[in-house]
Image: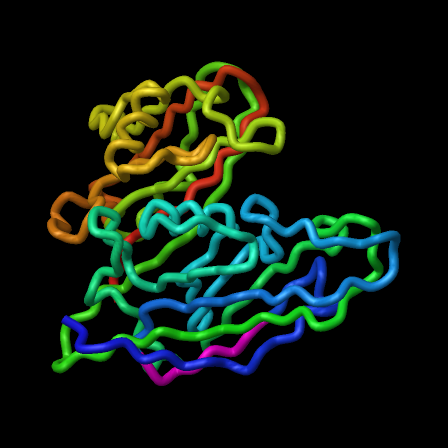
Amino acid sequence: MPTKVLKFSYPQVTLDGTYGTQVTINLKRNNLIQKYLGVVTLGTLQGGTTPAWTVSGSNPLITHVTITADNDVLLDMDTDMLNELNKLGFLWAPDGLTFRIDMTDIDFENSKNVDGTEFPSYAYNNITLTLTIAPLANVTSGSPTGSSGTYFSLVEYASVYPNTIPLVKVKKLQAEYNLNATGLNQVVPSPFYTLQGAYKLILYKMISGGVGSDSAVSKMKLTINDNNVIYDEYYNTKKADANQLFNIPLDAGFIADVYMAGAKDPSQMLVLLNPQITRVIEQDITTTTSPVTVKGVKIIYVPS
């Protein structure tokens, strides 16, 4: 168990003039990282007619985050997916300005990080955090032309152990797929289930008309090698089960495939590594409308 957590700050990064672009921050390579916490401070808007910020939990200033270590993508997702993971894991309500980026696995049963899954930044040479900044027009009213004094503050949280312990490498990666048929959509091969490692869970967001929808999908099924049915569930019962499992209602459009909610029994995880054993992975998603966009973030344990 860690004896303590150390916190190290980075120089503040100016976001003025970066709207609609990406900002890359070079990360330190000294510590065993539990998480990064970033906070945006909004500045003064310039130009326009009575300009005002419209940033909120559903309209964040940062729309996507990626962490790469020596060209290996460890975390990559839109911030609506990141915020929902944080809500389920830590009962935290997003505000559009605060971004908790956990490098560890999350123990959803006990609302804490999983010891032994931290990110060993000292094992890499080049680590970057890339932020996608929303266009200014998307997060303001009154048509401002710019801002001054808007910046991003970042702190890393490092775990300290009394002795060396084995570490498990965790990745959190997003995929996206468009369902263009109303009714049964057979997704083969699955962009969400790939032969990368042991799956803890996949968090999905079903999007119809640009917003999360609990009525766009009626049923989901996952089959491996044509005859091994992992699950075959109606959307509404699957959603109810997820709400009970996380002990908090998922937001509209969100649903999850959960194999190990906590941190107790890795044998529960769905292991997908060997192409000789796992030949075909098929997802059947039945929709009530079209088109439907499915976003999914997978938390997987991967070989080091």
Taking 109 as reference, is 46 above or below it? below
Q: Residue at x 55, y 75 (%)?
A: 25
Q: Residue at x 42, y 62 (%)?
A: 101
Q: Nearer the viewer, residue 183 or 157?
A: 157
Query: Over which residues does the magenta segment extend?
Result: 24-31
Residue 273 visible? The answer is: no
Taking 159 as reference, is 224 above or below it? above
Q: Hey, which quadrant is residue 35 in on the image?
A: bottom left
Is residue 27 in the magenta section? Answer: yes
Q: Residue at x 71, y 58 (%)?
A: 20
Q: Is residue 150 left or right of residue 293?
A: right
Colour scheme: rainbow
Q: Position of residue 276 (x, y in %)?
A: 23, 44
Q: Is residue 217 left or right of residue 105?
A: right
Q: Hey, which quadrant is residue 103 in on the image?
A: bottom left
Is residue 9 in the magenta section? Answer: no
Q: Is residue 261 left or right of residue 158?
A: left
Q: Position of residue 83 (x, y in %)?
A: 45, 50
Q: Residue at x 12, y 81 (%)?
A: 163
Q: Point out the residue furthest to the bottom here.
A: 30
Q: Hey, which quadrant is residue 69 in on the image?
A: bottom left
Q: Nearer the viewer, residue 184 or 95?
A: 95
Image quarter in which the N terminus is found: bottom left
Residue 72 visible? The answer is: yes
Q: Position of residue 152 (x, y in %)?
A: 58, 70
